Image (cartoon, rainbow, N blue to C red):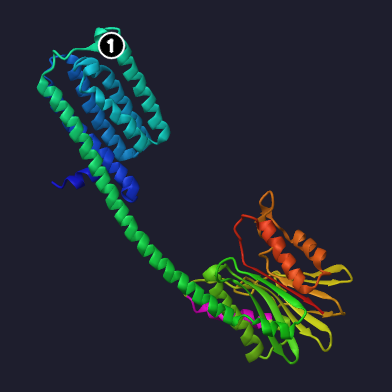
Amino acid sequence: MNISKVIDYFIPKKHLENAELYRKSQFIVWLFFVFILANPFFAIISGSDSTITLYIGSFIEILLLGLLLFFKYRGSFVFITHAICSAFTIAMFFIPLETGGLFSPDLPSIYIFPIFALIMGGIRIGLFYVFLNILILVGYYFLALNNTPFYLGTLNNISNEYFFSNVLMNFLIIIFLVFRNEKNRQKLLVALSVKNTLITQKNNEIQDSIHYAKRIQQAILPPKDLVDEYLPDSFILYKPKDIVAGDFYWMQQKDEKILFAAADCTGHGIPGALVSVICNDALNQSVEEHNLIEPGKILDKTRDIIVHVFEKSEEDVKDGMDISLCVLDKAQNTLQWAGANNPIWIIRNGEIQETKPDKQAIGKIDNPHPFKTHNFKLEKEDLIYVFTDGFQDQFGGEKGKKFKLANFKKLIMSIHNEKMKKQLEMINTSFEDWRGDQEQVDDICVIGIRI
């Protein structure tokens, strides 16, 4: 019979899946088996006719078997640790009377259990049994020092063979368990080292792929030179949560008009980035292939394209985007705008005018309706802000709460007289100060333009 299968039978199934718990469980089960087999052997070679030794030995055998079955079905390291250590501590309080008292070869076994408690149960349990066993040893010594027969004991009732056999067997048991545990620990370390190497390799491959994906995503974003050419007095704060993002900013020129938008696609990271590529392409198709220039109609056609793309999937995909889309006519000094869940702010003469978006996303939704186009006559020094929801949703501050839209509005109002590049620095600094040690929760995209 394979002994490993017998050992594994008494290990809880939930511990078999965890390498460290499995190692500790093996140690406990082996300890049970060794003491179950060794206890009768010690009783035989002791040569003692005392019934107390027989009773204690039988009690230990039954206790060990019961604990072994309990561990199999409950798997509690703390309970097993207390049960084993307390039982053997009590046994060590009485057994040495029959085998030599203070000079008993059994008494050194008392050193094993605090170490076992420390390993299996933790520091507190280990220290508890260290303190308890010190009290027992001090008690033995004090009573023996006062010639108390019960604790002084005698070596006359045991044979030399038992004395040396007991010491030898205790030594061999400890060596066996320690070396077996160390062997398993080394195997575990080797296995973990191999796994860590594989994980590192896979992680490097994934990171390389994500960084390459970032290059692709950056390629679809308008380059800085183009933004400066179309919108010279502007800024774009773009802060992906991860290496790649679900947020993106978009820009086109058509019929002497500048089209720009801040978009927030479903999710962030790689899933969000994949959706952003589809949504970016849908915007380009709406303008370039379908020759649309009105923001509301662009969003309608973009939604149709995105829904058509995702309809090819066998699953019900409802991914899409929220967006704030502007069409700026510099010659006529007019602005057309349409929004899907994201608003537009226009600051004029120190007052902010907010226009609410349509409460529907760009994607597959129930009861869709056409997006409304809003028209604005602009004046010199007007400021236009479009943004996604990442900034106001960020947790931070002293109480770890969301920044919220109202505070974002106050921030914009407090800096709107600054130059656009200075506004970019101040908004970014405000975000980082608010975030502090908190993790960034979402992608961020804020576009500001001065007319």
In the depicted view, which residue is nearer to us: 71 or 217?
Answer: 217
Q: Which residues are magenta?
A: 299-313
Element type where label 1 sits in the image? helix
**What residue is at 31 percent from the left and 39 percent from the top?**
73
Please rate how many residues cluster around mark 1, counting C-alpha atoms within 10 Å: few if below 14, some from 14 to 19, many from 20.
Answer: some
- The verdict on residue 375 being magenta is no
Task: Pick the residue in front: 114 or 152.
Answer: 152
Main SS class of the magenta portion in the image:
helix
Q: Nearer the viewer, residue 120 or 296?
A: 120
Task: State the residue in front, 100 or 356.
Answer: 100
Q: Amino acid at mark 1?
A: Ala
Q: Is residue 252 left or right of residue 319?
A: right
Does residue 422 appear anywhere in the picture? yes
Give residue 102's position: percent from left, percent from top: 25, 16
Q: Position of residue 393 (x, y in %)?
A: 67, 60
Residue at figure coordinates x 79%, y 74% from the top left: 384
**Residue under pointer 1:** 144
Relative to residue 158, is residue 72 depicted above or below?
A: below
Q: Is residue 63 above or below residue 207?
A: above
Please give the name of the residue rendered at 33% of the width and 15% of the height, measured from the top-left corner: 139
- Indicate yes or no whether the magenta region holds residue 304: yes
In this rendering, does residue 368 appear at all?
no
